[in-house]
Image (spheres, rainbow, N blue to C red):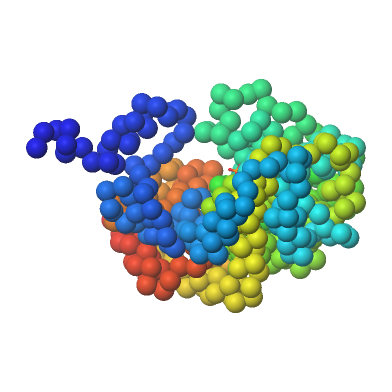
């Protein structure tokens, strides 16, 4: 056999990827040919267990049957229309479900559908500015809200998200969040926000605060209930809207439809959802009461592909499945199993500083503030056919985003491989 015929599909596609795709997109050495449930198969027939879920987009698993069926049926009727050219029912149906499931305060919940989490956050800020007549936005340490100019500005991490991409959007201010593992309490975080309002920005000019109730890219940091209660109290006092970014923590990921529902007495003004809502298709949304959502004059919101019919029928199927109390109970039980296992593993490894999360949205942070050990764990897992993702400001957190529908055998196999990978890498 000569060298050319020995080249695998994997190597050929990666060579073409290096030749034709921007180096600015960071990719692993995985070339996918098929995915089902919690498993991904590469072009050479190697099968991986997926604890990454396309970064939190597969809460209902790859090729969730009701999603695939709905997409097939919709493809037979019509594809793109543009909601601003022709109204179609699937868009309205997703908004109806989001209204029924909304955790937001206020009457008559309405939604806007867009393509991505970043676009949804951009629109949440536009809506908040329009509703309040104020310009400023407050965001937080460890935040990730997207990669567009405004959402990159709202995002906390310099490398790789901001470095070299300035100048940034104006009127974005940052406050601390509680992080007990690193010694920041609720009192500290509230004091930081008060200081921001004294030193940097008049709270009377702030349209909204935007916060992830469990910070995702920033390291799977759950916000404590007392902090959220005090933050929303301050928002009310100053007429500031509370935007709840649930792009990663929503759609069942924490064992409730929205992570904010874990916190008594905390109701957002606007909800931003995305990722898993589309069951693998691009969809994101902004949801809130008519008093806020209707503040923008007609024509001020929209976009060519926002709420594409295929994405909408997929989202309706996902929301119906996840809203089932049995689905959420199973997700919660899954979280209990994974947490117990992670705590057992952490007890054997001094390098693991903290196991944390909310329900099945779980991670562990390595005490060393460098990405090296986490990268070694991800690489060891990959060698053993398990897909893992690191996150955190120092890249030293391993997060688990397996489908919430994962079967017992796949879960057990994945956790065993995770343990083995830790034993090898640490
Ligand atoms: C909390 C949060 N908000 C917003 C985004 C941006 O979403 P997208 O990549 O769909 O623009 C992400 C993506 O990881 C996220 O985790």
Between residue 247 and residue 88, name the one nearer to us: 88
Examine the rendered structure and indicate whether residue 19 appears above or below residue 374. above
Examine the rendered structure and indicate whether residue 334 appears above or below residue 385. below
Q: Quadrant of the C terminus?
A: bottom left
Q: Quadrant of the N terminus?
A: top left
Residue 141 appears left or right of 423: right
Instruction: Name which residue lies at 64% across and 43% down.
Output: 80
Instruction: Name which residue lies at 60% across and 72% down.
Output: 328
Name the quadrant containing residue 122. top right
Instruction: Name which residue lies at 77% across and 52% down.
Output: 111
Between residue 126 and residue 3, name the one nearer to us: 3
Examine the rendered structure and indicate whether residue 310 appears above or below residue 320. above
**Which residue lies most toward the front here?**
77
Residue 68 in sight in this render: yes
Name the quarter showing ligand 1. top right
x and y, in percent, of residue 204 in the image: 90, 40
Examine the rendered structure and indicate whether residue 359 appears above or below residue 112. below
x and y, in percent, of residue 82 in the image: 70, 41
């Amino acid at each position: 056999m000569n060298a050319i015929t020995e080249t695998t599909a994997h190597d050929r596609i990666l060579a073409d990827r290096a030749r034709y795709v921007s180096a600015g997109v960071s990719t692993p050495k995985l070339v996918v040919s098929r995915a089902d449930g919690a498993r991904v198969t590469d072009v050479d027939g190697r099968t991986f267990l997926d604890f990454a879920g396309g970064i939190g987009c597969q809460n209902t698993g790859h090729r969730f049957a009701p999603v695939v069926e709905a997409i097939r049926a919709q493809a037979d009727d019509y594809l793109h229309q543009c909601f601003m050219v022709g109204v179609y029912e699937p868009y309205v149906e997703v908004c109806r479900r989001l209204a029924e499931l909304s955790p937001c305060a206020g009457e008559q919940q309405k939604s806007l559908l867009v393509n991505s989490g970043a676009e949804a956050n951009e629109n949440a800020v536009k809506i908040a500015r329009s509703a309040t007549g104020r310009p400023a936005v407050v965001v937080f340490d460890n935040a990730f809200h997207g990669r567009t100019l405004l959402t990159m500005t709202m995002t906390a991490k310099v490398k790789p998200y901001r470095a070299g991409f300035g100048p940034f959007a104006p009127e974005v201010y940052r406050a601390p969040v509680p992080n007990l593992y690193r010694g920041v309490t609720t009192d500290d975080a509230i004091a930081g926000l008060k200081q921001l309002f004294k030193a940097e920005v008049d709270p009377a000019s702030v349209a909204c605060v935007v916060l992830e109730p469990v910070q995702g890219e920033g390291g799977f940091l759950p916000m404590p209930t007392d902090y959220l209660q005090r933050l929303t109290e301050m928002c009310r006092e100053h007429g500031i809207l509370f935007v709840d970014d649930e792009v990663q923590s929503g759609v069942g990921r924490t064992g409730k439809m929205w992570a904010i529902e874990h916190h008594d007495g905390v109701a957002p003004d606007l909800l931003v959802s995305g990722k898993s809502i589309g069951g693998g298709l691009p969809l994101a949304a902004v949801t809130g009461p008519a008093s806020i959502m209707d503040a923008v004059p007609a024509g001020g919101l929209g976009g060519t592909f926002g709420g594409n019919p295929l994405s909408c029928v997929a989202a309706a199927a996902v929301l119906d499945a996840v809203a089932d109390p049995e689905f959420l109970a199973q997700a919660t039980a899954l979280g209990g199993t994974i947490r117990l296992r992670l705590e057992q593993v952490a007890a054997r490894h001094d390098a693991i500083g903290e196991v944390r999360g909310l329900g099945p949205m779980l991670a562990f942070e390595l005490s060393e503030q460098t990405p090296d050990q986490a990268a070694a764990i991800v690489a060891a897992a990959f060698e053993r056919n398990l897909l893992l993702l690191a996150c955190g400001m120092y890249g030293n957190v391993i997060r688990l985003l397996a489908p919430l529908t994962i079967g017992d055998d796949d879960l057990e196999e994945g956790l065993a491989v995770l343990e083995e990978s830790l034993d090898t890498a640490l």
